[in-house]
Structure formats: structure tokens, C-alpha cells
Amino acid sequence: MITKLVKLKKFGIYKSFSWNEDLGKFKKKNIIYGWNYSGKTTLSKLFQILEFKGSKQYFSNPEFSFEYSDNNGNVIGSITNSNYQEAPFFFKVFNSQYIKDVFISDDMDLDFQPISFYLGDESGVLDKQIKSLVNYNELLLARKGKIKTFFIDEFEKYDKKTGSKFSEKAKEIRKNYLDGNLNSDNFNLSHFRTIAEKVKQDLSAYILSNEDRDKIKNEATSEKKFELQKDDYNLTERLKQLSDKVQAILEDTAPKAIQFPELDDDQELFQWVQTGVKLHENETNCKFCTKELPKKRVQDLNSYYSKKLKEIQALIETASSEIASEKEKLKIKFPDKKNLGDNYQNDYSKAIEAFSKAAKQYANQLKILENDLKRKPNSYFSSISATSIELVSLETALQKINESVKKHNSWIEEFDDNKRKALAKLLDHYVAEYLLSDSYLDKEANSQRASRVIFKIDALVDFNKIEVSKLEAKLKSLVKGQEELNATLSILLHRNDVQIKISDDKFTLERGGYPASNLSEGEKSAIAFAYFLTELKSLRTEEPSLLPKTVIFIDDPISSLDSNHIFQIRSLIQDFFKGDDYAQIFISTHNFEFFSVMRDSDLFKNVRGLDKEEKRPFFWVRRKDDNTSTIEKLPKTFSEYKSEYVALFHLLRDYKENLSKQDFQYAVLLPNAVRRFIELYTAMKYPSSHDSVDVRAKLVFDNGSKTPHGVKLLHWFSHQLQFEKVQQHDDKLLQIDDAIDDLLTYIEKEDGLHWNGLMNKP
């Protein structure tokens, strides 16, 4: 027995459903309730995929997982989208698609009625039925041959063992695209096939631009002819230090104990005398003119050329030397760009150019410092201002050079690996480019669709073969099957004018003795449901019986039928499933009255008194705000009342009385619940079939006083086609509290008798 739908993703409106433990578990007998377009039929189609083992598909690549248990409730396995063809159950699904399949053939030009029965040969027509099935199989196999030739065989040309399109393209790539760098051992059909499987997942991600393709091709076909290069160029920048030092020298001054204006005004004389003083220490005569030196002349000059002056001169000389050294640092010998791989030369050249520009600016700043030092000898005894400089840095430029060289060195060190990677990337490009240009994915999709059609044909052919075997050996009589179907139809339609008849060795539908045409949707639903029950009976009478292993899903069996048929459908279902010889049953409906009579039927008599919601086998398919569906436990309000109208009333009243409205469990349902309640209330008060709910609301509520607040408003934003307005948090939604309060207050005050009935008051 299936106990949980653990997950359901990418299946129509079920975008990402996962089982909530509050749901409890599915039981052997389950009812699923939900309003129109909530997702019930979509859920039945999931079971239909299991029924047909995948030959019926509705959505691409869905993900699902069922959990199933033994009779003791022990989990024993899962049915998923990857293993469902080996599921341990049979499945039978009645839904709108089933009705279409009964009355509408596929496009294979069937020459017999789409309704066929598992019956015997009492009327002597079995041989012709068998021939009909055999002929039909021949038509199917002929169609299969055409499909296979046109789609599958055509697609197989890509990957056949000899002379395949992949082989020819691999040869072309080896010869024309890679300059003979590969041979058939390096790149052949097997390699092409492997790459194709990878890149087809996203062709555009593997296709390179022309520039990238040529760059990678150079790397893939290059030879190892380069050497490692120095990649740690650096220098210690001292521009800021030198600038500070020059500024300090320029601002420094030497004291003068004695005045010598002639020396102050003549720089050349100043320097000549400073040198001469050293030559005349302890001398009495001038060594140049031989004349006697004035007394204290040397002493006075030494006082003029003070120790501080000498220090400044020494600092100028040192600073000039340091600036010269700093200039020499800039004379770095970088490798020629030709010593680097082709793919790295461009970045390297840009880095060298950037360094040269920065080095020139750096040298210019050093030149400014030199010129400032040359100005100082004219101002030893006074402070002068330094020229402003720009603190240029070479660090970024050197870093760029090192980075570009390191890339080259890494390439050299990993040359073989890089070459292999480049070749792989290039081959990915060529294969992806070919698949795109040859519309490979479209042809693959067509081939896959054709395979699914062929699978369906093969399944139908095999099924027909089994049917022939059954018809030959052990099926029931035609007359008995005919009588059973007509008896069921009579119950459903309340009349005997529509009958299953045997005509020209075929089953046909007749109305009043003539071939039936223009059947109503209700008649089609009734006939299809009668046939569905006949199929289930055939499973029950198999030897051994298949019904105990069959999970049945019945979706809205009263669709297109009027309310008079509800009890007939309930009676047929209750009668058929009164025993215990089936695996599990799910019944879904949007009709609350049908839900109510099924809930009260003998089929569910053992669960009526259960108080704990998780034990009740009543579930709810609900459409959420984000336009997705989910499965929840049916609110107790709905499972307790026999009228949808009364259930809606108590849902609205529960909300009104709830003090924590922001925590109300079913708040998202309030707009649609109010709309439905107003529809039912106004239809009861003014049962006109021609007027809309807006017109009825105006007629019912407008009694001379103010119309209840928000009735029109609630109708506006609860309408399904405008449901996105609720998602957008329209300010009208904020008025729902007042609208519900006014609506219920109106009924209590203006329709007291009706209110007391709803409240179960005397």
C-alpha cells in the first residue's frame, strides 16, 4: 500500500511538493477534495504514468517518489521516477484522459471501435476479433517501420560502427583543424562520442569565440621551445626618503662668526677659498703669491667655514650620491618578449610599457631633487624651500611584469598538462560547433520521441498479442460482458436508450436502436465509467486475480454529470469495493456533495468517529499563492459538515472569532472562500440562472441600507483570474477583516432565522 508521496517536482502545477509529516499517511481508502484547477487531475496523471509504465508522459523529466509499506505499516520500498517500471503494483486510473482514450482513437487509422472488451466466444465472432487484432498489429508494425527509418535510423548515422557521421567528422578535425597533431588513436569515433555526450548538455558553454579558439589552438599545437625567465623583479623605492632628506638639507643653515661679504657674493671664490684654507694651516705666507698672511687670517676663515657648513656640504654630497644610485636601480634588464610564449607576449609588452612610463616619471622626480641640491651652495647660511615632487611608485608596474612572466613560467613548468587541457578544450569546441550546425539535439529529440512512440507501439502490439491469447483461452462471453455494461449504464443514465450492441462482429453504441452520435459529455462520462468498472471486474476474475495488487485512482467520476447521478456513482463504487480484494483506492472530487456522500458511505464507515485528523483518510489539494499546488490534510471544518456552504460559513466564522488572525491556518483561502459563500448565499436568496454573482449580491444586499462592506471588493480580488493581485499584497487585501465581519454581521442581523440555522440554534 502506498503511504506517502514523498516528493513531486517539475510535474505541472506541482513545482516542488514534499510530504509534510502532519499529513500522516495514505490509508487503503482515501478521499482527495479540492476546488477546480487545484491539481487533482494532474495528480491522477502521475498515477497514470505508473499505470502505463511510462508510455504516457505528460511533463518532461519529472521527479517523484512514493513510499509503500506492508500490511503492518512497515516501510518496504519506494517507487521513483527512475524505477517505477518495476513497481510491485498494478495501477488503474479513471480521469478525463481515460474518457478521451475510450472515445477518441490515436492517429493510427483504427478499423474497429476504440472500446474493446475482454469477452469470450459464445456468439461465434471470436475468430474475426482475433483477425482484427492481428491486422491492427500489422498496421502498427508498418507505422513502426516508417518511424524507425525516418527518425531512429537517421539519427543512428551519427554513431554507427562504420562510416558514421561522428567518424567522418573526427577524421576531418584531425586532418584540417589540428595541423596533423592527432592520429586515429588519439581522436576517433569513441573519443568523439564521449565528448558529444558531455557537450550536448550545454552546447553554447563549449563554443569559443574566434579569438579564444585561435589562442587555444596555438597553445594546443605549440612546441616546447621556451625557457624559464626571471620572475622576481623588485627594487626598494627611496623617492620619499630622498625627498625628505633633500628638503631637510635645503632647510638647514650654517652659522657665520665673521662676515666675509666678498665670499658671500662670489660662489666660485667661496669654494676656492674653502679649499685653500686647508692648505695654509700653520703657514705664515700665501702659497700662491708668497706674501705674508695677515695675522688670524686662517683662524678667521676657519670661523667663517664652520663645522655646520661642512656637515651640510657632506650631506649634499651623500644625497647626490644616493640619488645617482637610485637612478641606476631603474636600469633593469628585462627579458625580450620573444623569450615568452606567444599567449603571454601581449600582456608582458603592456607591463613593460607601463613600467617604462613609470620609471621615466620616477627619474624626473629624482632630477628635481638633484636640481634642488645644486641650489643649496648658494644658500648655505639661509633656508630655502624644496620643489614639490610627485611620489611615483614602480611597485604595481613591476608586479604586472612579474605576473606575466610567472604565467609564462607556469606554462613552461606545466607545458604538457596545459597543452593537453588546451587540446581538450579545442576538441570540445569543434564537437559542440558541429552538433549545433547539424541540429544534432533536434534530431536526438526526434529520435527519442520516436523511440517512445515505438515503445508505445510495441507495448500495444504485445498487449494485443496477450489479448489474442486470452480471447483464445479463457475470457468471458460476449453476451455476459454486454449485459454487465448495459446494466451499469442503465443505473448511471436512468434510462435504457443508450446500449452496447454487437453489430458486424464489433461492439457499437446505439441510442434508441440506431448508432449513437453526438453523445453528450455526461453520456461519455457514464459510458467510460461503466467500462472502467468492467475492466476492474476483468482484473478481479483473472486467474489468479490481479485486483489485490492494483491501486485504483478515480478522479471526479461525476464530472459532466448532474447531481442526480451522485448517489448512483456512490452506489456503484461502494458496491464494487465492499470487499477487501484490492490494494488501495483514491477518490478525488471537486464536488462537495459527492465528497459528503462518499464520506458517509459504508466504504468509510470505520473512520467517521475518528477525532485525530492524521487518522482521517481525507486529503486536500490546494492551489497556493505562488501558483503551485500542495497536498494537505482536509480542514476538520470540511470533513465534519455535509454541506460545502455550511463548511465555508464556519471557516469564515472561525477566522472572525480568531484572536491571532495572522496565524490563521487557512488565511490564503479566505478570498475564494468568501466568493464561493457569496455565490451560494445569493443563489439561494435569488435563484436566477441569468444573473452574475455581482448582480445577485446587489439585489440581495441592497435593501435600502448600505451594502455590506467589501462584498463587491471580495468578489474582485478573489476571482481566480486575478489571483496574482493577492500575491502583490494589494491594499484591498488588508480590508478582508472588515469585509468578513460586515458580511457575517449582515446575515446575523438581516437574516436571523438563517443565521440560527447555521449556528445550530433553536
Image: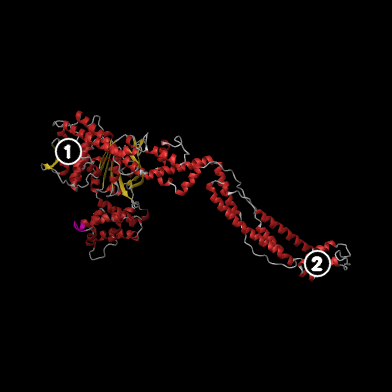
Q: Nearer the viewer, residue 428 or 23?
A: 428
Residue 54 can be seen, yes or no = no
Which badge, 1 or 2, comes first in the chain's sequence? 2
Residue 304 numbered tag = 2
**Residue 331 location (% of width, % of height):** 65, 53
How has the structure been colored for display? secondary structure
Q: Is 130 colored magenta in this rendering?
A: no
Badge 2: few (under 14), some or many (20 or more) residues near its Cα, within 10 Å?
some
**Residue 343 location (% of width, % of height):** 52, 47
Q: Nearer the viewer, residue 706 or 97?
A: 97
Describe residue 286's horizontal placement relative to residue 343 as left or right: right
Q: Residue at x 23, y 63 (%)?
A: 702
Give amino acid for label 1. Answer: Leu
Specify the farthest residue to the bottom: 261
Q: Nearer the viewer, residue 297 or 349?
A: 349
Give the Cα separation between the discs numbered 1 and 2: 138 Å
Q: Residue at x 88, y 63 (%)?
A: 283
Residue 366 can be seen, yes or no = yes
Give amino acid for label 2. Answer: Tyr
Describe residue 451's horizontal placement relative to residue 501 as left or right: right
Q: What is the quadrant of the C terminus in the image?
A: bottom left
Is 116 rendered above or below residue 212?
A: above
Q: Secondary structure at mark 1?
A: helix
Task: Indicate the quadrant where residue 252 lies.
Answer: bottom right
Say if mark 1 contacts mark 2, CB within 8 Å.
no
Residue 485 numbered tag = 1
The boundaries of the magenta stretch are 684-691
**Residue 426 location (% of width, % of height):** 46, 43
Q: Residue at x 48, y 45 (%)?
A: 216
